[in-house]
């Protein structure tokens, strides 16, 4: 029944949505030096992007070293001189506070972090917003966020974080929807190869991410067909090789020293993931408005509820308090006890006790 309902909603929304063709630069990257990256346009102060969305075509990230060429971009590989082997420190920090880097979702507004940042109490000068135009050349950062593959966006984000963290100031990542998948990809790579990790990145909050595997993951990989609800940018958490398969979600951040918190709203149904990774803290947010299935047979109402639940993680004092606590001291989020003991999907060893709502 859930699959049938989703298919009906999928068909209804597909009729209402359109897809435009992106503009792609054909020129290869001009340079892959650390100096060139540091001198290129980078997100400026406050909650805006850089190049500024209002600055016109002349301020595009032209011939950026992050634009994919001949496959995936080079990303973190070009920053070998800037990366350090990471160690998870934990505990309180002696600095004035981290720099927050927000990674929007598929079709996400660059200002999408504004409300949550205000609830956290972050000064606008302490926020940077990742620009997907570093991974997919376009005149519009929102369009780029729709078209950039997660792998290429991870290349760009990894390189940017290495440059941003060169002064040693702590960095805290916040990613919503597809942005959470991009962060998961970056941290998963650092776990596999800690020597390319960025020591300045101390933690990450991954909010309602479409990081599912299996059939749900396949649906999320074609999310662009049905609007902005959830698209994973072709992300797949299961990686297979000659030695078997691994799920990069398990123990995410352990080897690279990034303290990861995942927050999802199960009432969204299809926009996050099912199951529970081992050794990762996964918290379920109940925004009080019920499941999308409670609005059956109103298909459009169900679709609307899915989007509301998906975005609720960006407008929650509970989420803000958790992030604010984690930014001060790793592992300190005190998530409230669930209002009921109704178990939801999944099992695993993350967190204390069973996964309940």
Image (cartoon, rainbow, N blue to C red):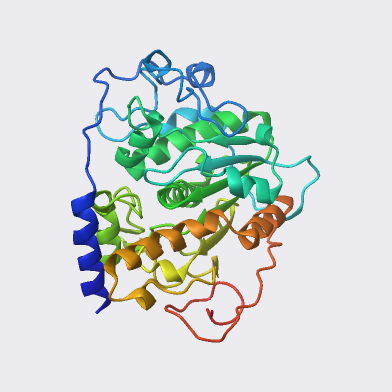
Which sits in the foreground, 131 or 311?
311
Which sits in the foreground, 148 or 117?
117
Please state the horizontal and vertical placement of residue 203, each as a whole percent of the image.
61, 50
Residue 248 seen anywhere in this rendered image of the structure: no
Q: Quadrant of residue 60?
A: top left
Q: Residue at x 48, y 32 (%)?
A: 159
Which sits in the foreground, 296 or 225?
296
Q: Is 218 left or right of 154, judged from the image as shown?
A: left
Please state the horizontal and vertical placement of residue 272, each as a whole percent of the image.
40, 62
Which sits in the foreground, 169 or 9?
9
Q: Residue at x 49, y 36 (%)?
A: 130
Could you tell me how many numbered marks the image carries? 0
Residue 220 seen anywhere in this rendered image of the structure: yes
Q: Is 339 left or right of 12, judged from the image as shown?
A: right
Q: Is 267 left or right of 338, judged from the image as shown?
A: left
Q: Residue at x 52, y 24 (%)?
A: 42
Vertical relation: 120 (above or below) 250: above
Furthest residue in direction top, as rendered: 58
Vertical relation: 256 (above or below) 262: above
Vertical relation: 261 (above or below) 302: above
Please state the horizontal and vertical placement of residue 340, each as a whole percent of the image.
57, 84
């Amino acid at each position: 029944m859930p699959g049938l309902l989703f298919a009906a909603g999928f068909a209804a929304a597909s009729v209402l949505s359109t897809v435009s063709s992106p503009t792609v630069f054909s020129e290869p990257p001009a340079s892959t030096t650390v100096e060139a990256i540091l001198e290129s346009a980078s997100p400026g102060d406050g909650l805006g992007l850089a190049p500024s969305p209002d600055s016109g075509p002349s301020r595009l990230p032209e011939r950026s070293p992050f634009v994919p060429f001949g496959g995936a971009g080079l990303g973190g590989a070009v920053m070998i001189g800037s990366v350090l082997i990471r160690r998870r420190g934990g505990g309180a920090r002696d600095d004035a506070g981290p720099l927050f880097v927000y990674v929007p979702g598929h079709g996400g507004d660059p200002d999408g972090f504004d409300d949550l940042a205000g609830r956290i109490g972050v000064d606008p000068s302490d926020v940077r917003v990742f620009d997907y135009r570093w991974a997919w050349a376009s005149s519009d950062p929102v369009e780029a966020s729709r078209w950039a593959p997660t792998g290429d966006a991870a290349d760009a984000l990894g390189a940017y974080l290495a440059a941003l963290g060169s002064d040693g100031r702590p960095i805290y990542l916040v990613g919503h929807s597809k942005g959470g998948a991009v962060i998961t990809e970056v941290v998963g790579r650092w776990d596999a190869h800690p020597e390319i990790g960025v020591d300045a990145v101390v933690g990450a909050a991954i909010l309602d991410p479409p990081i599912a595997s299996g059939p749900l993951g396949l649906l999320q990989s074609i999310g662009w067909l049905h609007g902005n609800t959830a698209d994973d940018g072709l992300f797949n958490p299961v990686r297979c090789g000659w030695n078997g398969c691994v799920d990069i979600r398990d123990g995410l951040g352990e080897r690279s020293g990034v303290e990861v918190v995942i927050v999802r709203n199960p009432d969204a149904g299809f926009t996050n993931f099912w199951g529970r990774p081992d050794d990762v803290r996964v918290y379920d947010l109940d925004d009080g408005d019920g499941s999308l299935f409670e609005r059956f047979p109103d298909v459009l109402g169900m679709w609307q509820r899915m989007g509301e639940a998906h975005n609720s993680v960006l407008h929650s004092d509970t989420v803000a308090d958790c992030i604010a606590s984690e930014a001060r001291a790793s592992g300190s989020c005190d998530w409230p006890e669930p209002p009921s003991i109704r178990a939801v999907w999944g099992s695993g060893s993350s967190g204390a006790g069973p996964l309940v709502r």
